[in-house]
Amino acid sequence: MKKNIVALVMLCTSVVALGFSAPAKAGIGQNVVGPAIVIGNGTTAIGVDSKFGVSDTLSVRPFVFFPNGATVFGSGLTYDFNLPNPAKAIQITPFLGGGVAVASASGVNASSTTVYLTGGADFDINENIELKAALSIPLTSGQTTNVVLGAGYRF
């Protein structure tokens, strides 16, 4: 039941973020959704990661991951550095920002909130596929640094 509620919250967050991106030059290539993995503290979790362009340089990045017996969802806001690449073989877009993640364990009424800094890069493989590599550094004590790797469909 909790996973269904979390999935619904993530869907609503994504729809709202997409709505905010529409007036600000929401062209092809600014929005991405796809699978991702998070690696940290000796564990790996799978989930869905996304990016919605709010402007040419700002992106909202909602996500949901499912580590063992828990659900982690949240969103970040990043500044995307648009670097010119005349070769256009692979366009690399570095980003820096921060966000909030909420973790809840199934069967337990415990949850935790983490504020984090994030940095990484988006790699445009072609007009439809984008890869992502990021490092999330928590500002909340007791949390671990995570590596996020993902692939997504751009629309």
Image (tube, rainbow, N blue to C red):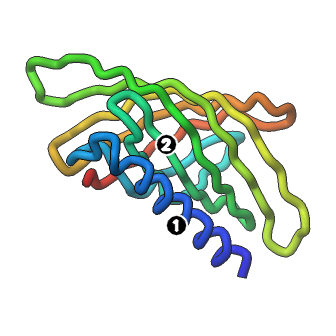
User: Is 83 drawn above or below residue 67 in the view shown?
Assistant: above
Residue that mark 1 sits on:
11
What residue is shown with label 2? 60
Q: Is residue 10 left or right of residue 124?
A: right
Distance of mark 2 from mark 1, alpha carbons? 14 Å
The amino acid pointed to by label 1 is Leu
Tell me residue 48's x, y (percent): 49, 58
The residue type indicated by label 2 comes to: Val
Compared across the picture, whether 33 is left or right of 103 comes to left
The residue at the far front in this view is 23
Q: For the N terminus, which image quadrant?
A: bottom right
Q: Residue at x 24, y 37 (%)?
A: 124
Label located before the other in sequence (2 or 1): 1
> Residue 66 at x, y = what percent?
63, 62
Q: Secondary structure at mark 1?
A: helix
Name the secondary structure under disc 2. strand
Q: Which mark is residue 100?
A: none
Quadrant of residue 130 within the rendered picture = top left
The image position of residue 76, as x and y in percent, is 57, 40
Asked if residue 81 is positioned above or below residue 3 in the image, the reply reads: above
Q: Residue furthest right?
A: 109
Residue at (69% x, 62% y) in the render:
71
Q: Residue at x 79, y 71 (%)?
A: 106
Q: Residue at x 33, y 41 (%)?
A: 24
Tell me: residue 16, above or below residue 108: above
Q: Are marks 2 and 1 in contact (CB under 8 Å)?
A: no
Within-10-Å neighbours for mark 1: few <14, some 14–19, many 20+ = some
